[in-house]
Amino acid sequence: MQFDTRAIHDGQPPDPSTGAVTVPIYQTSTYVQEAVGQLKDGYDYSRTANPTRRALETCLASLESAEHGFAFASGMAATTTVMHLVSPGDLVVSVNDVYGGTYRLFSKVYEPRGVRFSYVSADQCNTGLERHLDGAKMLWLESPTNPLLNVVDIASAAAAAHAAGALLVVDNTFATPYLQRPIELGADIVVHSATKYLGGHSDLVSGFAATSDDALGQRLAFLQNSLGAVAGPFDSWLVLRGLKTLPVRMRQHCENARAVVGFLGGHPAVTRVLYPGLVDHPGHEIAARQMRDYGGMISFLVDDERQARDAVARTRVWSLAESLGGVESLIETPAQMTHSSTADAPFATPPNLVRLSVGIESADDLIEDLEQALA
Ligand SMILES: *Cc1c(COP(=O)(O)O)cnc(C)c1O
């Protein structure tokens, strides 16, 4: 079945006891056993498994073309759980402009515990990545990256990772499975902050990981249950509800982003627009190959930090806030906000960068508001 149909139905048959069309919120910690060890549908305790969470895991795994899906309390909980696949002494190679919180987890939590990290630019990923993977256990990618919208060729990165004996993990938060499916391109594991486009309404914090490898799936199930950072039933239900409109929302996010990019490109206060849909973007050809469309995230540079701070404080339709991927448009300066944790990194975010999460309001209103904010 097509993606749009699976987003609404996969993992969600009508409730067998009542016929309810929507999966109920199974707000329960435990399940009655008929006799010791005789479980109904395999449920014994909600950290291990919960029917609402399972519906989400089934649906989202299907959308990512993965066999096994796992829902977590946050994107960082998903990342933490996946990072338990490596041990002290192991080398993790990561693209350098990763999400600030991911960089903080790597540099301030895992590095002090003995995991080794090295960072490569998107450009280095796309030209001779093999040279950087010697002895690596894991390659960690985002594409498009946050906040610079660099694009990494996932299929060739997968080939390079596998030749080096490393696992490829792709954080697919920016693209969503509607626009890009890393597992189909050869990635071993895909992770998400479901807080963003998957939930889509800025009303929850959640995370997700998926794989099609049975052994990795078994290990992740074990780690999910052992570490315990699971998604609760209500948050699972909210993400399930968000997924039903993911395709229509993404189409509108992309269409609005195109209009906003067109406006920014002609604005005298804007020195550069970073958007993979632009033909002069260095990753445009790769993005055209591996993505259905170019997404709702745009970054742009203005002359200096002062101008960036002034512009984001003046918008009325765009809210000055961290996060992204909701129906409402958000604006921020990554260097001072989402990515302040990379300030001491060699690849710190430029202070004159503005990041937009383009919502699904009227594009005319969004452009008019940017026009007065940049004036
Ligand atoms: C937000 C985000 C995360 C972290 O997810 P949380 O749900 O906030 O824990 C990870 N990766 C990317 C790309 C993000 O945007």
Image (cartoon, rainbow, N blue to C red):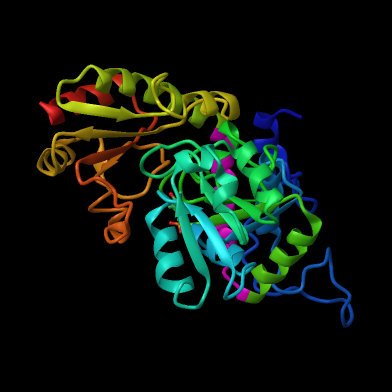
Q: Nearer the viewer, residue 204 or 265?
A: 265
The answer to whether 333 is drawn above or below residue 46 in the figure is above
Residue 110 % position (x, y): 48, 72
- Looking at the rendered image, the quarter that the C terminus falls into is top left
> Going 59% across and 30% down the picture, which residue do you hit?
290
At which x and y percent is residue 96?
42, 51
In the image as oriented, which residue stretches furthest toward the front?
131
Question: Where's residue 247, x and y in %?
Answer: 56, 30
Q: Residue at x 75, y 46 (%)?
A: 19
* Closer-to-camera residue (154/258): 154
Count of residue discs: 0
Q: Which residues are magenta?
A: 227-246
196 over 220 or under it: above or below: above
In the rendered image, residue 229 lying in the magenta stretch gets the answer yes
The residue depicted at 15 percent of the width and 26 percent of the height is: 269
Which residue shows up at 62% across the image and 57% down it?
25
Query: Quadrant of the rendered structure where residue 78 is?
Result: bottom right
Q: Does residue 188 appear in the picture of this structure?
A: no
The N terminus sits in image quarter: top right
136 or 219: nearer the viewer: 136
Was residue 26 drawn as part of the magenta stretch in this picture? no
Is residue 42 at least partly visible in the picture?
Answer: yes
Q: How far from the left and from the top, in percent, is residue 55? A: 69, 52
Quadrant of res 209: bottom right
Secondary structure, magenta segment, majority class: helix
Left or right relative to 183: residue 154: left
